[in-house]
Image (cartoon, grey):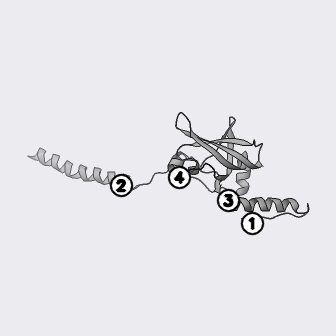
Amino acid sequence: KIEDSIVMMSYDFILPTVFGLLLLSLSVSIQACKCAPVSIPDAFCEFDLIFLGNVTSVTTSESDYENIISLDVLKCLKGDCNSTETVYTSASSASCGYIYFVPSESGEDPVGELFLVYSSSDSGKNNVNGCSRTKKIGSDAYDLLMEIDALSQLAEPRQTLSYFY
């Protein structure tokens, strides 16, 4: 009888504990990708290629570990840009993939959209991640950027535009 009561006490303790831990594990949000904010000057120094580009296609590699994004370059801001650039990002935002280039996670199709792209070059591959300052640009913002660019080219050489962040 003593052995039976010890076994019952074990079940009375173990089952609620396991059940509680299971519930706790379901409520905890796990994020593998954590990013520190990066200032514009730091990002300019850190990334090899910065450009405004229009997404023409998004494909997933055969391994399913990364998305391959092709963009028509509209304006090169840093680096040696080609008229078309290909960038790579993880196929999962949990492993720092840029979410707007991961249609299954963002729910949006980026083809035809304009982006300001910050990419790092690694073995000849342009990589984008969720911690870069890469962002989707609306058409109104693009028009404004082009107008500012045109105005800055018309300004006298001694005049400069100041941006405050």
Say which residue label 4 marks: 106
Say which residue label 3 marks: 139
Label 3 close to label 4 by CB (< 8 Å): no
Q: Is residue 59 above or below residue 142?
A: above
Q: Nearer the viewer, mark 1 or mark 3?
A: 3
Say which residue label 2 marks: 24
What is the spatial separation of the Cα atoms under label 4 and label 1, in whole angstroms?
Answer: 31 Å
Amino acid residing under circle 3: Ser
Q: Quadrant of the rendered structure where residue 135 is? A: bottom right
Say which residue label 1 marks: 164
Earlier in the chain: of badge 3 and badge 4, it is 4
Amino acid residing under circle 1: Phe
Residue 32 visible, this angle = no
What is the spatial separation of the Cα atoms under label 4 and label 2, in whole angstroms?
Answer: 27 Å
Q: Residue at x 69, y 49 (%)?
A: 53
Q: Nearer the viewer, mark 1 or mark 2?
A: 1
Amino acid residing under circle 4: Ser
Q: Secondary structure at mark 4?
A: helix
Q: Callout 2: few (<14), some (14-19), or many (20+) C-alpha neighbours within 10 Å?
A: few
Q: Secondary structure at mark 3?
A: helix
Earlier in the chain: of badge 4 and badge 2, it is 2
Residue 139 in the image, given as x and y percentages of width and height: 67, 59
Q: Nearer the viewer, mark 4 or mark 2?
A: 4
What is the spatial separation of the Cα atoms under label 3 and label 4, in whole angstroms?
Answer: 19 Å
